[in-house]
Image (cartoon, grey):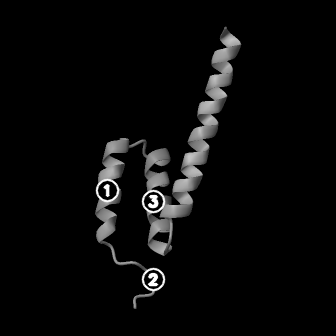
Amino acid sequence: MKYAFGVIRVCVVALIINTVADMWRKGVKNVRDYIVFVVVMALLFAFDLSAILIVLLASGASFIPNIGSKKP
């Protein structure tokens, strides 16, 4: 029975990795997005901040103008 839970755990990790990769391909489009990603990772790992606070800060980054985007 414990082997079944191990297999389920591996499948869940694979699904999470697949979802993150899919979101990365669809979501990260310009320089600003890369900058937000790097800052969020630094805040999460270096300062051990709450994920809720990080989401609020990242939503505030939506007001920063896009760097390197081509406007028609």
For label 3, the residue is 39
For label 2, the residue is 69
Residue 53 drawn above or below residue 72? above
Badge 1 element: helix
The one of 42 and 33 positioned closer to us in this rendering:
33
Disc 1/disc 3 C-alpha distance (Å): 10 Å
Q: How many marks?
A: 3
Determine crowd level at label 1: few under 14, some 14-19, many 20+ residues with C-alpha closer than 10 A.
few
* Identity of the residue furthest to the top in this view: 1
Q: Earlier in the sequence, mark 3 or mark 2?
A: 3
- The three-letter code of the residue at mark 1 reads Leu
The one of 50 and 8 positioned closer to us in this rendering:
8
Determine crowd level at label 3: few under 14, some 14-19, many 20+ residues with C-alpha closer than 10 A.
few
Estimate the x, y position of residue 60 in percent, counting from the top left.
29, 62
Estimate the x, y position of residue 8 in percent, counting from the top left.
63, 24
Of marks 2 and 1, the one in the foreground = 2
For label 1, the residue is 57
- Residue at horizontal 68 percent and vertical 23 percent from the top: 7
Residue 13 drawn above or below residue 72? above
- Tell me the quarter of the image containing the N terminus: top right
Left or right of residue 33: residue 60: left
Q: Quadrant of residue 16?
A: top right
The one of 43 and 18 positioned closer to us in this rendering:
18
- Residue at horizontal 51 percent and vertical 62 percent from the top: 26
Badge 2 element: loop
Estimate the x, y position of residue 5 in percent, counting from the top left.
63, 17
Q: Quadrant of residue 51?
A: top left
Disc 3/disc 2 C-alpha distance (Å): 20 Å
Q: Are marks 1 and 3 in contact (CB under 8 Å)?
A: no
